[in-house]
Image (cartoon, grey):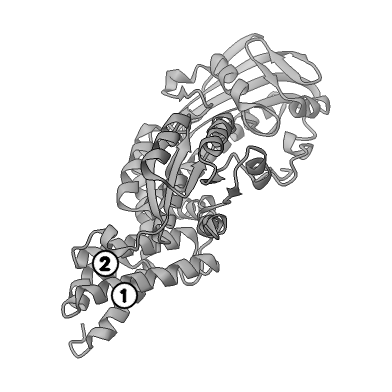
Amino acid sequence: MDTKKNTADMLGELETAVYQGDIVNIRDNGPCWVRNAPVQSVIDTLNRAMERARDGLKHAVLSVPEFLLAMDAFREGLRLVKQPESKARTQGRCVLIGVVEGEVHDLGKNIVAAVLEDSGFQVINPGELTRDRTLDAIQEHRPCLVALSAMMSTCIPAMQDTITWVRKLHPDVRIMVGGAALDADLAATIGAHGYADNAATATDAARTLLNGK
Amino acid sequence: MGNKELCPPDFIPPTRDALIAGIWKASGTAPTSRNSRTITDMLARVADAAMSVLDPRSLLKQTEITGIEESVLTGREVSIASRELCRLMASMDRPDSIFGFALTLGGELDALIVQTQRKSLAGALFLDAAGSFLAEQYAAQVEDHLRVALALQGLELSARFSPGYSDWDIACGQPELFRFLLPQTIGISLWPSGMMSPFKSITGICIAAAHVPHRTPCESCHKQDCRYRRVVI
């Protein structure tokens, strides 16, 4: 490590390492990079790196796995200054996300949840969302958006039932759906306001749905 | 000929490089020149971790075809409601048997994916992709094994076909196939949604006939933009 490097240069290295998802580099050199930097500067650097990563994902410069690696690196960076994630992120509009009743495969949903959280949404992710659990969670957390995922076509009726009741009891709440069992046409047919094809498009789809709200 | 349990092949694991290439493919991305050392290292670790927890098991069962209607194919112990499959069979010369198979990579891989999600979503995504690739490899090996064995008897084999694909409804097809195959005996259980546990499990059928000019219902399926559509093999 070049001891003559100033703090700004070293934070620049941290930013690059986070953007590139280079966790090993952060683990090895991070403590030195942040040694003389104020905590807020480190947090700002980490957020800047994630802003670049989000932009990279949006413009297909980064793939979803590369973006997720950047998120892993972001978390590693927060450990350098012993800050919880919630302190480092702005808590924006609330999204309730879950897999519909009967679904057990939730990796895709968790990835979308992480991407939305990274994009500034406050994400409530209780896991499986039955109709009643969805309605209860809306009462409790007052989300602007409910995001439902289904991988199996057999779960679409449960998704449609949930959407029907959310629209009936909470007409202000937007509903976005996604998952292997759906496409944009089916999403519209079952009453969803919007559809996200994958994690890379989920943030834009959510923002479009909430535009003006 | 009635129903017959057959000896399935042992799983032949791919090389590490082949598995890494398969992980890229199954995760829907491609390696680029900018892929960092981190991602390369992670893929190598994921490939090793996936291989270390595999517990591959499979079963194979044959049943004689007893009827082919417009939209239902029946065997002695199983019926398959698929107009597309029946249309495919109409082009076959002397359809002979239905071969059903079930296979799994075991529950430890599922547990590892869940556990990895807590630490690294990228790692979990790659592990999941590794599982998808390995399960498909295993299914291809079962199919190839059957094809070679049948060729010795002068028979040809269709491509494998699973509930949920084309017009074979998963809600009815998967329970029906479970009744025929009893995959519980190799540790596979069925959720009400039609999903299997362990997740990285596959069930399906192949058709044996004297001549199989078209091997997959995808060739005539109307879902032209289906992401799972198989090209003509």
Q: Position of residue A71 (x, y in %)?
A: 36, 61
* B90 sits to left or right of A199: right
Task: State the residue at coordinates (76%, 29%).
Answer: B84
Q: Which mark lies nearer to you, 2 or 1?
A: 1
Q: Nearer the viewer, residue B37 or A130?
A: A130
Q: Position of residue B136 (x, y in %)?
A: 54, 40
Task: State the residue at coordinates (52%, 37%).
Answer: A166
Q: Residues within 10 Å of mark 2 (few under 14, many from 20)?
A: many
Q: Residues within 10 Å of mark 1 (few under 14, many from 20)?
A: many
Residues under labels 2 and 1: Cα distance?
9 Å
Q: Position of residue A91 (x, y in %)?
A: 35, 59
Q: Position of residue B98 (x, y in %)?
A: 67, 20
Which element carries disc 1, helix, strand or loop?
Answer: helix
The correct choice, above or below, for A197 with respect to A186 in the image is: below
The residue tagged 1 is: A45
Residue B68 visible, this angle:
yes
Which mark, by number, is residue A77? Answer: 2
User: For the C terminus of chain B, which image quadrant?
Assistant: top right
Task: Chain letter for mark 2, please.
Answer: A
